[in-house]
Image (cartoon, grey):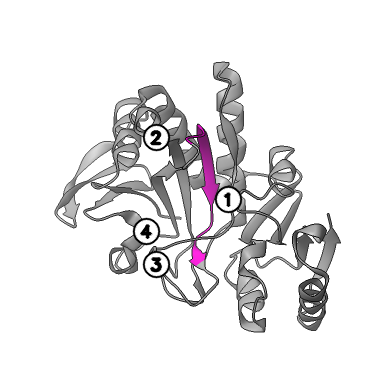
Amino acid sequence: MNKVILCSEEDPASLNIRERLIESFGFREDSSTMFGNPIYRRGDIRIITVNRPSIYADEEVSGIDAGLIVVASKHVSEAGVKAVLSHPVGNWGEKAEFGGRPRALAVTSARAVFAAVSRLRSLLEDAGLTGWDVGMEATHHGPYSEKPLLFVELGSSPAEWSDPKMGEIVAEACLAACAAERVNVPEIAVGFGGGHYTPRFTPLVLQEKVAFGHVAPKYHFPLSSEMIREAFEKTVERPKLAYIDWKGINSEQRQRLLEELSGIGVEYVRL
């Protein structure tokens, strides 16, 4: 399967990760260009660079031929927490202020998100680095994509974005996502409820028990029937299992969610 690691000229962390891929992981400049930028290649993986922030690169993504797109990106945290993260992409609500389309999820791969988060954790442990959060975020922002797409992020301030060692760690996690078809995943699911940083779901990923595709946080409830169905349809592994952060949504919203899940033949696990 042809894969792409997508970088952005507007993103310092993305450029750091791209440089580490070229320096440390054997990518070589191709004879072709895309969007006016050189393409780098290693085997069936290409590095393609866009000229705008990647969250707004819907048009560019639509023109990329790939079985998987891994977006190397910065992460921004108002609290300034040092973090390395991965997440699916899409907008649950009527607004698309940060790219993508309103009420539309990009296709994603639960297995690739799982592989990225697992590799981030193991690389930090192997390097003896402490003080870093490792995890998964709920589905948010753009770009819209009909090819499987996920973000792998380095955060959360300019000091971390430009750190060569951390750039190399995130670069290797991007490669792990590209090789996700070889990863053994016990369960694949969609997550509902809880906060943006998926406090009930991330531990299951880090314990290598569950791979999550799309995750809908509590602040986007109530969800329409169409968006609940889309969460499963836009996860390429087509899971038939939901994990619910039970206290992460109110009882009325939870009951409606259970009715919708039953209607589409999806079982659930209560957390």
* First reached walking from the N terminus: tag 3 or tag 2: 3
In the picture shown, does residue 213 fall above or below 250? Answer: above
Label 3 neighbour load within 10 Å: few <14, some 14-19, many 20+: few
CA separation in Å, label 4 and label 1: 15 Å
User: Which label lies toward us, 2 or 1?
Assistant: 2
Stretch in magenta: 80-90
Q: Amino acid at mark 4?
A: Ile
The total number of labels drawn is 4
What is the crowding at mark 4: few (fewer than 14 residues within 10 Å), some, or many (at least 20)? Answer: many
Q: Nearer the viewer, residue 47 or 77?
A: 77
Q: Which residue is mark 2?
A: 157
Give the numbered dot on residue 137: 1
Numbered disc 4: secondary structure: helix
Q: Earlier in the sequence, mark 3 or mark 4?
A: 4
Residue 181 is at least partly visible in this image: no
Separation (CA) of disc 3 from disc 4: 10 Å
Q: Is residue 144 magenta?
A: no
> In the structure shown, which secondary structural element does the residue marked by tag 3 occupy?
loop
| Identity of the residue drawn at 32% across and 62% down | 56
Q: Nearer the viewer, residue 177 or 28?
A: 177
Q: Which mark is residue 36?
A: none
The first of marks 4 and 2 along the sequence is: 4
Q: Nearer the viewer, mark 4 or mark 2?
A: 2
Closer to viewer: mark 1 or mark 3: 3
Spatial separation of the CA atoms under disc 4 and disc 2: 18 Å
Single out the residue that lies furthest toward the right.
270
At 60% from the left edge and 75% from the top edge, which residue is drawn?
Answer: 230
> From the viewer's perspective, is 142 left or right of 62?
right
Instruction: Tell me where residue 256 sits by quadrant.
Output: bottom right
Q: Which residue is mark 3?
A: 97
Q: Secondary structure at mark 2?
A: loop
